[in-house]
Image: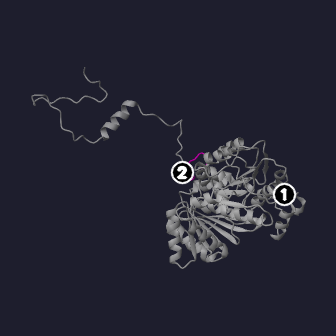
Amino acid sequence: MFSQFALHERLLKAVAELKFVEPTPVQTAAIPPALEGRDLRVTAQTGSGKTAAFVLPMLNRLMGDAKPRVVIRAVILLPTRELAQQTLKEVERFSQFTFIKSGLITGGEDFKVQAAMLRKVPDVLIGTPGRLLEQLNAGNLDLKNVEVLVLDEADRMLDMGFAEDVQRLAGECKGAHQTMLFSATSGGAGLREMVASVLREPQHLQLNSVSQLNEGTRQQIITADHNQHKEQLVHWLLANETYQKAIIFTNTRVQADRLYGRLVATDHKVFVLHGEKDQKDRKLAIDRLKQGGVKILVATDVAARGLDVDGLDLVINFDMPRSGDEYVHRIGRTGRAGGEGLAVSLICHGDWNLMSSIERYLKQSFERRTIKELKGTYQGPKKVKASGKAVGVKKKKTDKKTEKKAPAKTATKRKTANRPKSDAPALVSRDGLAPLKRKKPTEPAAE
């Protein structure tokens, strides 16, 4: 029960109103030390309730009587607009019985309107690093009195090239403050550097090893000959799998638009989501999927993080993601909060090595699946021996005892006898009368 935590009664009232009964493992582990003001480094799978794990302690720290708002007291940094919008809704839901006000700053919105909102000084500011830094450089943002800084999906922000922006924004939080860093993966050296620079003696909470992520999701691969074959497989899966909602991931915007057009042409209700879509279209696509107006979303990795949609139980990787962490986030859109899901990756010859490296990273072996009606010729690389030589290729055995080497002169004669006559013209002397003998190739040229 959430009553076990030392939360303000108004927050517990909101929790009860939202019908939150049992805290998830990440909430049980993170909320108590967060309430104590500890810096946290938390790794937990997507859909595990991470947002509430940092929002509730943050709001509890900001609780108090209504006062004029003169400084921004908490900042939540996130990698994408969609995740920022979703987090804003969660903060507003949990703070509905309090005097705490929140604001949102992301790209794709009017800069001057956002500046006007900042002049009203929200208690909690939620945003993406790029646009927050623009407002900071314009003199519209003051972070000197921030009490709580949250970096959510920190590994994704690094992947998107926001490392310097995040460091700069964290550095602007001059006063003593609590920092909490959350992600679904352990990340690499870049994330370790960020942890070292922005967190002070953090408590590390590892809720899941990477091999335990998405245990409720079946993970399959289907081999394909080429992209047209992949498109046929997508049509077959959408026609024959039982699902409520599905996301199809591609690596490029061009491929997302192409696949979207193919599906629309076959009367599927589908939206497309990628970085070139304006904010209005992106919001419409997500809202229609959540409301059930469409069942299928074709998207690039802009939708791989933070997109929480009820009933999303099928993920298709048209293109294999470029890293194990990205794969974890993609398939994390399904099988959320203890539910079950299906993730199918379509593998051409160019995807096999990438798929194998992701299997090794996850310490898992994906289920191999064949669709009889669309079975292609490519079934994976030929098996090889440990030595790296193809199986079935036998080397001729030679008996060293009986093998005799031919004398060097004999070999030379045999080679000369079989050589075809040269078509090169004969060399003659300068007067054109006496033929000259050709020099042997091995003879040194005359000085």
| Residue stretch in magenta | 385-392
Q: Residue at x 58, y 77 (%)?
A: 269
**Residue wearing tag 1:** 28
Q: As drawn, is 63 to the left or to the right of 124?
A: right
Query: Does residue 366 appear in this view?
Result: no
Q: Name which residue type carries label 2.
A: Val
In which quadrant of the rendered view does residue 343 lie?
bottom right
From this view, report whether residue 207 is shown above or below residue 429: below
Q: Nearer the viewer, mark 2 or mark 1?
A: 1
From this view, report whether residue 122 is shown above or below residue 385: below
Q: Name which residue type carries label 1.
A: Thr
Residue 357 covered by magenta stretch: no
Q: Position of residue 26 (x, y in %)?
A: 80, 57
Q: Nearer the viewer, residue 71 or 251?
A: 71
Q: As drawn, is 5 to the left or to the right of 346?
A: right
Q: Position of residue 445 (x, y in %)?
A: 27, 24
Query: Does residue 437 appear in this view?
Result: yes
The span from disc 2 to disc 1 (Cα, nearest Å) is: 58 Å
**Residue wearing tag 2:** 393
Going by the picture, which residue comes out furthest to the top?
A: 447
Classify the position of the N terminus by image quarter. bottom right
